[in-house]
Image: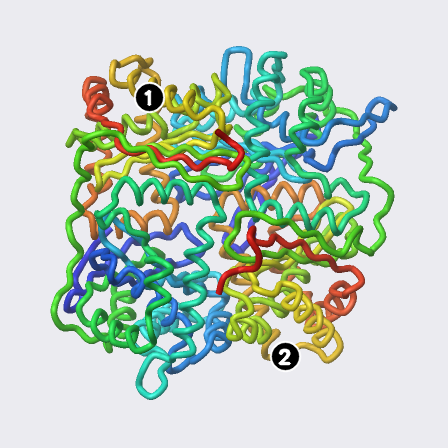
Amino acid sequence: MTRETIGGNICFTYIPSEKFKTGFFSAQMALPLTAEAAGRNALLVNVLSRGTVRCPDIEALGRELDLLYGARLDPTVRKKGENQLFGFVASCVDDRFLGGEERLLEPLTALMGEMLCAPALEDGRLRSGYVAGERANLADLIRSTINDKRSYAARRLLEELCAGEPYGLSRLGTVRDVEAITAEDLDRHYRDVLPRARLELFYCGSAPQDRVREAFSAAFAALPRRGALEPVETLCHPLPEQCRTVTEEMDVAQGKLCIGYTTDSEDRMATRLMNSMFGGSATSKLFTNVREKLSLCYYAGSTYHRSKGIITVSAGIEQENYRKTLDEVNRQIEAMASGRWEDWELEAARTSLLSGLRTMEDSAGALEDYAMNRAVTGAESLEELRTGLIEVTPERVRAAAEALRIDTIYFLKGKEAQ
Amino acid sequence: MRQQAYPRLGEKVSRRTLSNGLEVVVVEKPLYAKSYAFFAARYGGMDLRFRLGGQWQDTPAGIAHFLEHKMFDTETGSVSEAFAKNGAVDNAFTSAAMTAYFFQCTDKFYENLRLLLECVSIPYFTKESVDKEQGIIAQEIQETEDDPDWQVYEGLMECLYAVSPVRIPVAGSVESIRRITPQTLYDCHRAFYTPSNMILVCVGSMDPDQVAAEAEAILPKEGGEAIERDYGAGEGRAPARREKRRVMEVSSPMFLAGCKCRAQETGEGRLRQSIVGDLACDVLFGESSPLYTRLYEEGAVNSSLGGNFDQLPGAAYLYVGGEAKEPERVFEAIIRQARRLGEEGIGEAFYQQVRRAAYGRMIRSLNSFENIAVSMAEGNFQQFDYYRFPEIFDTITKGDVEAFLREEIVPDHAAISLILPAGGPAIG
């Protein structure tokens, strides 16, 4: 993996690989996540994806992509630590499988450049019809997060746990903010943010670095560059004074229990390993005890939010098992903190994380996500992760568990439940 | 092992049928860090009534899925623990016509392969563990009851089919799984988990001969009796009902509509039909189609609109769905467009463009080891070689797709399943 600057505040990450059938690209603006701009950025990328000067509507864009052997070019909006990334991910079949002289890389990167730098306009501004259409779609999309109860509950927990911090914001903004954006606002925002935000470019595939660099440079030659709006460092979540509980009612058959813990430890490697043992796999403490031994739920797992210093637990449970599950989850944290585990549990978690690092190299999408995470949140290099995980001792794992403080509980319960 | 190269795909595959009838397939992927093994039985949610030893048996809905959950239990504990110790990640799924067990690892491949072959071929069920699993699966079923994507699909299957077991949810119901006992599980395992009813697909840089040797050493020497399956009396083309509505906690109306299509015989014709059906979806409502563009620009649909052509034993259907303010109107427009294209023909340039994209997508899908394994297994169960798709692609004409639209996508064979938001129609 190499990373270079190829223009004013434009960074290019390149990963050579012969193993995939496709080449994988991304081009994203990276900037701090704020309540004011989150919705605008999300809307902007969707409006930009409606058409360019050369391919002014989705039918023309569709034709262009079809002719590139079903190339994909999709808008993306992500939260990485307390930064927002928005732009496009793209992929196309490798030239090797086309049996001719066709080249797909240059036209596809050119189209990515057009999407960001040369959108379809009317009277010199972003098209108001596209803004109105995408505004309605984005508002619907934000509303639809309620459809998947598991991820809805996980997001609600983060909102409550990190209230007042950028990390608690949705990557898409709120329905209210999005619905208030006019075409004029968005056009102004586009012209304000595009020249300033850092542009992150990524490629993984079989093409040589020079060819990709040249294609990207040509594609983004028209990108105006002035000023520098850099991603920010993510601040750790402060330790809680006391545990807060938030309950919400909905007409659902299964309850969703989510618990947020804040860590008082700066030992990120040990916390990563501890989380994997605690709730990161099908042999974790949570899965084996809460699901398998006690049949309290269908799923139970935990996630380590490295940049924020928090761990979140998520479980789907019978309504009446709320207290029992909560107690059992806390009991498992205590077990971790007092070193009540077998050696193999630690070694299995370590092997699984190390194996995960290696298999990441088998997925261009996973590599891209990791590379962008590293670019904006300063995550460890793959080598640092490998050696770091190998060095973690049982005592450090125990200490990492001991450093957890229960912070916020979120419970989504059925209407009939008590 | 017989090795075959597929130059148009840049792939090499070794195959052998063992003396017990097990099909062993090894797809070479030398550059990858991971190795993958996939062990599947031709047995799924549809296989509820079958004849074994001259005796017809009726089994409770959800039993194939229940069995899948219990196979990772062994006399010495959960095999997942053993996989985890080797750094392998294991999983399993049950679909309408297949149950599959698989793992991915970066080290100790053969050790993991032996674990997989042993745990799937040696059943171990106790009353206690079956009772406990009933609790876990009941929770899983309850979660699907809150999942609108799942519910809208189940609704469509109930509409389209009157007798085919396709209409029964793969996981069964909280009531049906209560009837499952250790004995029913043992019976179904003995019937369906026989080498001649299974396939082993490995993807990675393993040695094909050693894979075959491991399978021969661990699995039974005898293949097993042929199983006769009852999927109900032949279905007519008319749907069982036209429409099903359900009210749920969703933000806007969702739909899944479909047409019941003629089911193909096994063999390469089936792969061909699946490509023709997918091309029909692309020209009808694909992202570059004129109809999709119009509906999207009107705000009648959003980017969630999508669909596919699916084939199961004795059943085939084309479906399309997503979020829409007026789902019925969207589906009517699709049916009308099918009729227009079927009668007036698809524009030549548009057809060529869509065809090129579809081919690229099939190549792209070979990035996924799981896609490869599932396609290989389906091909084996339905008697075709999936990797021959480039050659089959060459034989498909615009006329084939037009005929499909004319004959298969007609109102008389259509039904729609709707999920409506609680508290009335959608806001804004």
Q: Quadrant of residue B40?
A: top right
Whether residue B19 is visible, yes or no, is no
Residue extending furthest toward the left: A227
How many C-alpha atoms fall within 10 Å of the one at disc 1: few (<14), some, or many (≥20)?
some
Q: Which amino acid does label 2 sit on?
A: Glu
* Residue at the (61%, 44%) spot, across then down: B376
Q: In which quarter of the image is residue B351?
A: bottom right
Q: Which chain carries label 2?
A: B
Q: What residue type is labelled 1?
A: Asn
Give left or right: position of B342 versus B327.
right
Q: Nearer the viewer, mark 1 or mark 2?
A: 1
Q: Which chain carries label 1?
A: A
* Residue at the (70%, 71%) spot, across then down: B338
* Residue at the (75%, 60%) spot, across then down: B414
How many C-alpha atoms fall within 10 Å of the one at disc 2: few (<14), some, or many (≥20)?
few
The residue labelled by disc 2 is B348
Q: Relative to residue B214, is residue B173 depicted above or below?
A: below
Residue at disc 1, secondary structure: helix
Q: Are marks 1 and 2 on the same chain?
A: no
The residue labelled by disc 1 is A330
Q: Relative to residue B265, is residue B335 depicted above or below?
A: below
**Residue A311: x percent and y percent?**
28, 33
Coloring applied to the structure: rainbow
